Amino acid sequence: MNTLDTLYNVIQTRRSQPQEGSYTCYLLDKGLDKILKKVGEESAEVIIAAKNPSCQQLVQEVADLLYHLQVMLSVRDIPWKDVDIELMRRAEKIGNLKPMREADKNT
């Protein structure tokens, strides 16, 4: 089991066994709209961090985004395993390149 699997399992546990003071429980209690707002905020923070020289800040923002995405998936009852399977499926396509199309630079 990797770190993302472990994190998703913690989120699922918080759903079934809420703990007072848990940020995950706070998000789950506020509902999907609050979670989606956080996903949007974290996405913007990743973009900003990517433009800045600090690699550590970018790593932290990506971690925040992955966490909030997992909370979103949990609320939608989509197992993290499904995302992992999709990524593996896509990885199998590597090397299966499509021919390049010439861009119309006049439009």
Image (cartoon, rainbow, N blue to C red):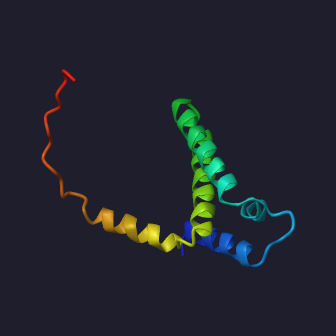
Q: Quadrant of the N terminus?
A: bottom right
Nearer-the-camera pick, 70 or 51: 70
Q: Compared with residue 42, is residue 14 higher up or lower down, i.e. above or below?
A: below
Instruction: Where is residue 42? Give x, y as percent.
Output: 61, 45
- Residue depicted at x 73% and y 72%: 14
**Looking at the figure, which quarter contains the C terminus?**
top left
Q: Residue furthest top?
A: 106
* Residue 59 to residue 71: above or below: above
Residue at the extreme bottom: 16
In the rendered image, residue 17, in percent from the top left (x then y), is placed at 77, 78
Q: Is residue 62 above or below residue 73?
A: above
Seen in the picture, residue 59 relative to 8 is either above or below; the reply is: above
Horizontal placement of 82 versus 26: left or right? left
Quadrant in which residue 28 is drawn: bottom right
Expressed as whole percent of the image width and height from the top left, the position of residue 49 reads 57, 36
Judging depth in this view, the residue of 46 and 103 nearest the camera is 103
Residue 74 coordinates in the image, percent (x, y): 60, 68
Number of numbered markers: 0
- Image side of residue 42 versus residue 92, left or right: right
Q: Is residue 60 left or right of residue 30?
A: left
> Residue 3 appears in which quarter of the rendering?
bottom right
At a point 77% along the width and 65% down the height, the residue shown is: 25
Query: What residue is at 70 percent from the left and 60 percent from the top?
Result: 31
Residue drawn at x 60%, y 39% as measured from the top left: 45
